[in-house]
C-alpha cells in the first residue's frame, strides 16, 4: 500500500498567502490547518481546500505546532508555513521517498525569496533558513515552549536530504523584513524574561559581530551583494534588540 502523508500548516491571519500554499499540498492524503486567533478569511480558505480545521488560541508557537502534529492522522507529516510553496517536483519526490524510507525524518532544502528575488546565501535562522526537518514520521518531532523560533527535538534516525526545494517567500520587501525583525525580537524578549536569564549587554553586543560574520562571510552572504549585507545586519541585530526589549520594556510579546 502507498504510504499516507498528512500536510500541516499553522497560520495566524494568512488569507493573502494560504491559498497558494494549500494548492501545492493537494498531493497529500489530508491537510490539517491550525488557525490561531484568526480574524480574517483564513478559515474559509482552508475549508475550501478540504482542510481539517483546528481553531484555538495559543500563546506559544511551540504549543500550537505540537497541537497540529497531534491532529495529523500520519504516519508521515509534511509541516510547512503559509508563506512556503511545494512544487510538483518536490511533491513527487516526497511521494517516492516515503514509500521506501527507513528513516524517521528528512531535511528539505529551502529557497528564500524577498519579493520575487531569490536569495540563496547568507540566511540566519531568525529570518530565513537553508533547510529544515519538514518531512517526518509522527511521533519523532516536538517543538519547545517558546513564543518564537521554538527549540526543536527530533527522535529516531535522520534520512537523506531531499533534492527539490521548498520555496519560501520571506517577505514582500525590505520594510516587511524590518517589521518581522521587530515582531520576532518582541516575542523573543518575552521568552527571555520568562526564562529568568536575559543574558548580558556585553555578550549580546559581541553577537552583533559574530552573527554578522556568520551570515555574511561563513554563509557567503557577500555573494548576494547589498541583500546579503542587509540579511547579515538583521541577523546581527536580532539578539541585541531582544535583549534590550527584555531589559527595558515590560510588555508581553504574545502576538
Image (cartoon, grey):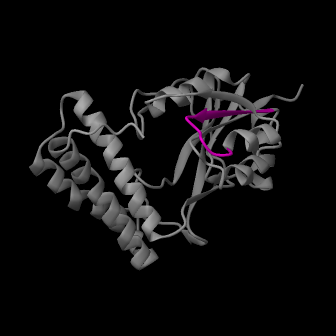
Does residue 115 sit above or below 109 in this rendering? below
Q: Where does residue 158 sit, x and y in percent of width and height?
A: 57, 33
Q: Nearer the viewer, residue 96 or 66?
A: 66
Furthest residue toward right: 1
Q: Quadrant of residue 218?
A: bottom left
Does residue 145 sit above or below 19 in this rendering? above
Query: Which residue lies at the image location 30% right of the left edge and 37% below the top edge?
Result: 252
Q: Where does residue 31 sit, x and y in percent of width and height?
A: 75, 34
Q: Quadrant of the N terminus?
A: top right
Q: Nearer the viewer, residue 151 or 53?
A: 53
In the rendered structure, which segment of residues is drawn in magenta?
30-41
Q: Where does residue 2 sit, x and y in percent of width and height?
A: 87, 29
Observer able to see residue 153: no
Q: Where does residue 164 sit, x and y in percent of width and height?
A: 69, 55
Query: Which residue lies at the image location 27% right of the left edge and 58% below the top edge?
Result: 237
- Residue 104 lies left or right of residue 205; in this view the side is right
Q: Nearer the viewer, residue 3 or 245?
A: 245
Query: Which residue lies at the image location 18% right of the left edge and 50% below the top edge?
Result: 204
Q: How many marks?
A: 0
- Residue 6 lies left or right of residue 110; in this view the side is right
Does residue 8 sit above or below 112 in this rendering? above
Query: Which residue lies at the image location 54% right of the left edge and 25% below the top edge?
Result: 66
The reply to whether the magenta stretch includes residue 33 is yes
Amino acid at each position: 500500500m502507498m504510504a499516507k502523508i498528512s500536510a500541516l500548516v499553522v497560520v495566524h491571519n494568512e488569507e493573502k498567502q494560504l491559498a497558494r500554499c494549500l494548492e501545492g499540498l493537494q498531493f497529500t492524503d489530508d491537510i490539517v490547518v491550525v488557525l490561531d486567533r484568526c480574524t480574517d478569511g483564513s478559515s474559509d480558505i482552508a475549508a475550501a481546500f478540504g482542510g481539517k480545521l483546528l481553531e484555538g488560541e495559543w500563546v506559544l508557537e511551540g504549543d500550537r505546532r505540537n497541537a497540529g502534529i497531534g491532529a495529523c492522522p500520519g504516519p508521515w507529516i509534511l509541516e510547512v508555513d503559509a508563506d512556503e510553496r511545494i512544487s510538483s517536483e518536490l511533491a513527487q519526490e516526497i511521494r517516492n521517498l516515503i514509500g521506501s524510507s527507513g528513516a524517521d525524518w528528512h531535511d528539505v532544502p529551502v529557497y528564500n525569496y524577498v519579493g520575487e528575488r531569490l536569495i540563496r546565501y547568507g540566511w540566519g535562522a531568525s529570518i530565513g533558513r537553508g533547510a529544515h526537518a519538514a518531512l517526518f514520521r509522527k511521533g519523532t518531532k516536538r517543538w519547545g515552549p517558546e513564543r518564537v523560533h521554538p527549540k526543536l527535538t527530533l527522535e529516531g534516525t535522520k534520512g537523506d536530504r531531499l533534492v527539490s526545494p521548498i520555496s519560501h517567500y520571506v517577505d514582500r520587501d525590505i520594510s516587511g523584513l524590518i517589521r518581522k525583525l521587530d515582531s520576532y525580537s518582541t516575542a523573543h524578549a518575552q521568552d527571555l524574561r520568562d526564562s529568568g536569564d536575559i543574558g548580558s549587554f556585553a555578550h549580546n553586543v559581541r553577537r552583533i559581530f559574530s552573527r554578522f560574520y556568520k551570515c555574511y562571510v561563513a554563509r557567503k552572504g557577500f555573494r548576494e551583494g547589498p541583500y546579503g549585507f542587509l540579511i547579515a545586519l538583521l541577523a546581527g541585530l536580532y539578539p541585541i534588540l531582544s535583549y534590550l526589549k527584555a531589559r527595558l520594556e515590560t510588555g508581553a510579546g504574545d502576538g
